[in-house]
Structures are given as structure tokens and as C-alpha cells.
Image (cartoon, helix red, strand yellow):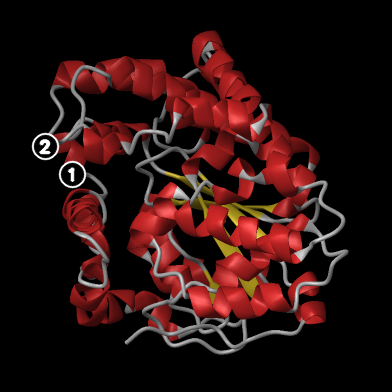
């Protein structure tokens, strides 16, 4: 059964906080997003690039005409990941846009998009929105430009487990992925130093060992009460997954939804299993472990994954990976028409498997 959050007034939408999950990919972000979405008062849909993708096109809009609203509606509903993986209630979104004031902000329109997504979980009145997208780790300045009061959940996973997960889809990337992991955390930490109060840091391994404690702490950070169904999220996932997959309007969408669930998100249908924490030890060779450990030693040590390591001797980031992050920032600062000349971005982990 699909659930939609209760309709809010314009004032309530304007005051609704939006928070972001920051992490290197394959760090358990989908698991955390699902746990949070299980909360009655949290809206936490699957990741999408719509927020930053349409930023340059609509952020300066100060007169939302019917034509502008219709164009925004078409842009959002056709956005790649929303059209493939969300269960967007178009009627609800249209109703929201009908009450969008002409002088509304772009962020208010974006909140309406989040609020229009159907969830598999029972929903009450939304008290916050959570947007999870690993690419945000490299785009913090752009996110803060839109939501200067946002909070950030920094999710960390042992680089060896993280890279092992990537290796299921692409071989021979141990060193590059480990350097990217190190650099992504360096970049997040550089913002955390100046705005510590905006960040909640959570290790994936701790979440798996004691979900009740760490989710309770996270809810307190978000000014919410912990709800026990956040730890039994998989029951609703299992009860609803077939309905979600078969709601696809065409064969290609159905194929990608099924492939995405089987290859990437299958674990969200299972209970929390702490044995996943060290599974990389039996899957990586000693050489692979050394390569990853050496390339990511600085933050592996800082986050308590390596002991007896002289952190000052290790590099905290890779110049090449940091340059890649700045290239991604530049990409999202380009006009949308120029970005769309490249057409849609690849669905990397899915398309590599075709």
C-alpha cells in the first residue's frame, strides 16, 4: 500500500526543514534513507538529481506563472531517476503547484516535489525532509546556497567494505576508489570544522551493531522522537516491493527497477545483519586490502578503523580526486541547456551490468 504525506499549507512547507545525507557511494546510504523514511514524520525518497539539476533554471524565478509551473512539472516528472525509481503522485504535485504563490522560492517548489512522493511506509504530518545522494558530498557549497540552515548526516563506512562493494560492479579500481573515499571524507570534514553544529556523524558499522541507539541519537539531532518501526523497515519493504516494482508504466522502467533492487538495494528487504560489517575480509585478497588501506589510511585511522598508525605520515586527500570533485561542481554550475547536451547521466551501476 502506498502512503502519501499529509498535505501541508504553504507556510508549513516554507518552514519545513530539509536535511542531507553525505557519504561516499556504497556506504549504506540507501539503508539509512529507508530507515528514516520508515519514520511517520520524515519524508525521505530515493535519490534524484532534480534539486541541483534544475537549480540554475528556476532558482531566480520570482514570478511563478502557470506556464512556469507546467514547465517545472514536466521537467521534474521526466527527470531520469524520478521517472525510473520514484513513485511520484503527479496529482498531488499538481495540487501543490496550484497553490504555489507567484513569488515563491525555488526551494518551496522543490519541497513540494519531495512531499508528492508516495512512500511504502505509513505517513503522518511531515516534520522534515531527508535528501540522500552521495554526489552531494562533493557539492556542499551548492546545497548550502539553497538551504543555508540545512543539517547534514555524515555517514561513514570502512573504506575496505565500501570499495569491496564497488568491486562487485567494476574490477581493478581498488586504489582509485580508496583515494576517492579518503578525499570525499576530507572534503566533508573541511566543512564540518567550520559548522560542526550542522553535522551528525554516524559510522555504518555502529548503525548495524546498535541501530536503536544510533537512530535514537540521530532523531534527537533532527528534533524528532525515535520510532521503533525504523528498525523493522524491511517488513514494509517485503510487503510492498512487488507492488512498487510492478507499478512501472513500461518494460524498460520495470527492468531497471528490478535490476536496481536485485543488484544494489536488495539488502533493504532484509533485517539488519551485523555480519555484513566484516564481509570484506573474506572477499578481498591480502594485496587488495593493503592497496585500499594504504590509499585511505588517513581517514581509516581518524575514524578508528586502523590502529597504531601515524596519521601525520598519510595523505588526507588525492589531488586528482579533489580536482574531479571541483569538475563536478563546475558541471552543476553550467547552464542546464549546456549540461543536457550530454543528455542524461549514466546509471553507472545498472548500465555496467547490461
**Label 2: few (<14), some (14–19) or many (≥20) C-alpha neighbours in 10 Å:** few
Q: Name the residue at 38% across, 23% down.
A: 178
Rendered position, 269 above or below 346:
below
Rendered position, 302 above or below 223:
above
* Residue 314 locus on image (x, y percent): 50, 13
Q: Name the residue at 12% across, 34% down.
A: 283
Quick check: marks 2 and 1 in contact, CB under 8 Å? yes
Residue linked to disc 2: 282
Q: Nearer the viewer, residue 115 or 196?
A: 115
* Residue 89 locus on image (x, y percent): 47, 75
Q: Name the residue at 17% across, 54% down.
A: 255
Left/right placement of residue 42 relative to residue 277 reads: right
* Residue 66 locus on image (x, y percent): 73, 66
Rendered position, 321 above or below 149:
above
Residue linked to disc 1: 279
Left/right placement of residue 140 relative to residue 352 reads: right
Q: Name the residue at 59% across, 62% down.
A: 73
Q: Quadrant of the N terminus?
A: bottom left
Amino acid at each position: 500500500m502506498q502512503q502519501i504525506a499529509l498535505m501541508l499549507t504553504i507556510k508549513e512547507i516554507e518552514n519545513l526543514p530539509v536535511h542531507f545525507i553525505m557519504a561516499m557511494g556504497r556506504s549504506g546510504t540507501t539503508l539509512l534513507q529507508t530507515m528514516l523514511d520508515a519514520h511517520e514524520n520524515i519524508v525521505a525518497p530515493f535519490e534524484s538529481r532534480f534539486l541541483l539539476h534544475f537549480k540554475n533554471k528556476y532558482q531566480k524565478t520570482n514570478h511563478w506563472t502557470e506556464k512556469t509551473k507546467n514547465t517545472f512539472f514536466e521537467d521534474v516528472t521526466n527527470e531520469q531517476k524520478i521517472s525510473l525509481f520514484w513513485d511520484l503522485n503527479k496529482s498531488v504535485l499538481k495540487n501543490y503547484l496550484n497553490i504555489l504563490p507567484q513569488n515563491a522560492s525555488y526551494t518551496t517548489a522543490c519541497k513540494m516535489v519531495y512531499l508528492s512522493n508516495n512512500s511504502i511506509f505509513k505517513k503522518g504530518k511531515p516534520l522534515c525532509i531527508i535528501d540522500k545522494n552521495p554526489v552531494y558530498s562533493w557539492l556542499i557549497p551548492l546545497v548550502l546556497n539553497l538551504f543555508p540552515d540545512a543539517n547534514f548526516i555524515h555517514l561513514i563506512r570502512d573504506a575496505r567494505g565500501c570499495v569491496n562493494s564497488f568491486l562487485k560492479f567494476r574490477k581493478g579500481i581498488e586504489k582509485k576508489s580508496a583515494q576517492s573515499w579518503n578525499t570525499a571524507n576530507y572534503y566533508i570534514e573541511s566543512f564540518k570544522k567550520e559548522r560542526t553544529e550542522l553535522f551528525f556523524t554516524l559510522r555504518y558499522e555502529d548503525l548495524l551493531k546498535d541501530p536503536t541507539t544510533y537512530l535514537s541519537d540521530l532523531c534527537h539531532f533532527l528534533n524528532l522522537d525515535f520510532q521503533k518501526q525504523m528498525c523493522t523497515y524491511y517488513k514494509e519493504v517485503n510487503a510492498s516491493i512487488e507492488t512498487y516494482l510492478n507499478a512501472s508504466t513500461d518494460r524498460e522502467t520495470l527492468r531497471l527497477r528490478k535490476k536496481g533492487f536485485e543488484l544494489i538495494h536488495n539488502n533493504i528487504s532484509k533485517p539488519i545483519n551485523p555480519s555484513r560489517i566484516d564481509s570484506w575480509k573474506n572477499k578481498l585478497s591480502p594485496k587488495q586490502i593493503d592497496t585500499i588501506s594504504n590509499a585511505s589510511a588517513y581517514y581509516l585511522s581518524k575514524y578508528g578503523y586502523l590502529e597504531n598508525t601515524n596519521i601525520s605520515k598519510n595523505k588526507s586527500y588525492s589531488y586528482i580526486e579533489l580536482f574531479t570533485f571541483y569538475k563536478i561542481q563546475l558541471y552543476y554550475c553550467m547552464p542546464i541547456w549546456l549540461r543536457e547536451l550530454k543528455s542524461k547521466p549514466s546509471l553507472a551501476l545498472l548500465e555496467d551490468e547490461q
